[in-house]
Image (spheres, rainbow, N blue to C red):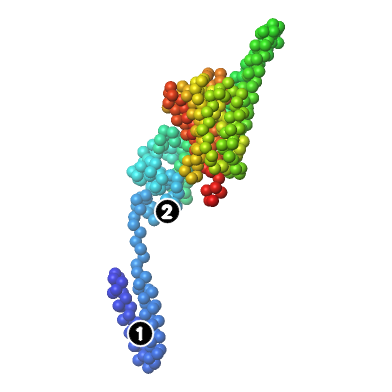
Amino acid sequence: MLSSPATRTILAIGVAALAALLGFFLNGDAQAALVLFVGALAAILIVVLGGDPPVTAPRDDLLPGTQGTATGDVIEAIAEPVLVVDATRVVAANAASRALLGAHILGEDVRLAIRHPAAAERLLDPAEQLSNAPIHLVGLGTREQRWEMRVHTLASGERVVHLVDRTGSYTADRMRVDFVANASHELRTPLASLLGYVETLADGAGEEPEIRARFLKIMHDEARRMDRLISDLISLSRIEADKYRAPAESVQLDELIDQVCQELSGSPRAADLVTEIEAVHPVRGDRTQLSQLLHNVIGNAMKYGRHGTAVTVSLRSEGEAMVRLAVTDQGEGIPPEHIPRLTERFYRVDSGRSRSLGGTGLGLAIVKHVVERHRGRLDIASAVGVGTTVTVRLPIEPAVIKS
């Protein structure tokens, strides 16, 4: 085989010229010979210059017996970890599986490659090979990761092992279970108190006016606590339902802050409120949800700040596209290890104090979801013995930015 393109081209021209001369000598027609020369040259060049087919470099994700197979090409295109195993060893592995289990798994015993007893039992026990039910693995990758392993048998007898990361769905399921358990507990506590006092009054303990009045006040407080909790649960559910629906109102935050401060004027700490409000552009938002955000953040600062110290509410522009709302109290502060969990549902730094102040444990969770729906950002900074600042950044109306 001629390896040089130049050599093949010269040979093609020579063959075409020879064909043209032969045609001229046979019929004496120079024009026909020229046409024959051009046609022969074109045909030969197409064949000759095509060259040899490209040589594919060996792939390192397949053993020698499986290089270039359709199965190998298919599994490499899959983003999730996929392996092909024979009776006892790994014969092919895509990039995702090598990243998870290590590049050394090719050719290894399945038990050493996957390193999980349940996986080895499924892959090496002939009785288990007939089952298509997935098995769940914990411990591959990090300790927190949870995987679902599915096995499919090919016509060749080899098996395709597909690993699906279920960590996210497991975490979501765990959060739902915890939420239901916490909500049930929070509702059961005041309900049990109510039932207890009702039974006590029914037994005649409320004959004395002072005792009856005290019991009725406790029952009223517990009923109000249940009402607040149910209202917050409904609010959280509605906000989550609207999560992917963009707010459509134009909201002037400075006016809304003034309104909320007026609504809080009946609070014992209303005199401690200090506002530092600048004129800002309107935001695209949901007025009801933003009002609830302000009530929750300012209300928390008034509850947990020291009496007689300022609760400062500030609003100003930040850059050309954001407004910045900050609420600062001068309370006891929050230890740093608690801050990442403050927006979790029913999470409390001090459960007893929170309940005594009327907290439901859902206030900052609602704030977080409102901020997320408005495509904003929530930051909480605190220093023990100094106080806490909750900062909310929200984008201004797109129409204002364009103008």
Residue at 40% over, 37% down: 141
User: Of all residues shown, which one is farthest toward the top?
Assistant: 208
Q: With 27 as the anchor, is 252 left or right in this view?
A: right
Q: Residues within 10 Å of mark 2 (few under 14, many from 20)?
A: some
Residue at 49% over, 29% down: 328
* Kind of residue indicated by mark 2: Asp
Residue at 63% over, 15% down: 218
Q: Position of residue 221 (x, y in %)?
A: 63, 18
Q: Compared with residue 367, is residue 4 higher up or lower down, i.e. above or below?
A: below
For disc 2, the marked residue is 73
**Alpha-carbon span between mark 1 and mark 2:** 46 Å
User: Of all residues shown, which one is farthest toward the bottom?
Assistant: 28
For disc 1, the marked residue is 19
Q: Nearer the viewer, residue 248 or 342?
A: 248
Looking at the image, is mark 1 or mark 2 earlier in the sequence? 1
Q: Compared with residue 181, is residue 76 higher up or lower down, i.e. above or below?
A: below
Q: Nearer the viewer, residue 248 or 157?
A: 248
Q: With 67 as the anchor, is 265 left or right in this view?
A: right
Give SS at disc 2.
helix
Q: Nearer the viewer, residue 167 or 134?
A: 167
Q: Position of residue 385 (x, y in %)?
A: 43, 22
Residue at 61% over, 38% down: 287
Considering the image in quadrants, where does the N terminus appear? bottom left
Q: Nearer the viewer, residue 199 or 344?
A: 344
The label number, if any, that marks residue 152 in the structure image: none
Q: Position of residue 275 (x, y in %)?
A: 53, 31
Give SS at disc 1.
helix
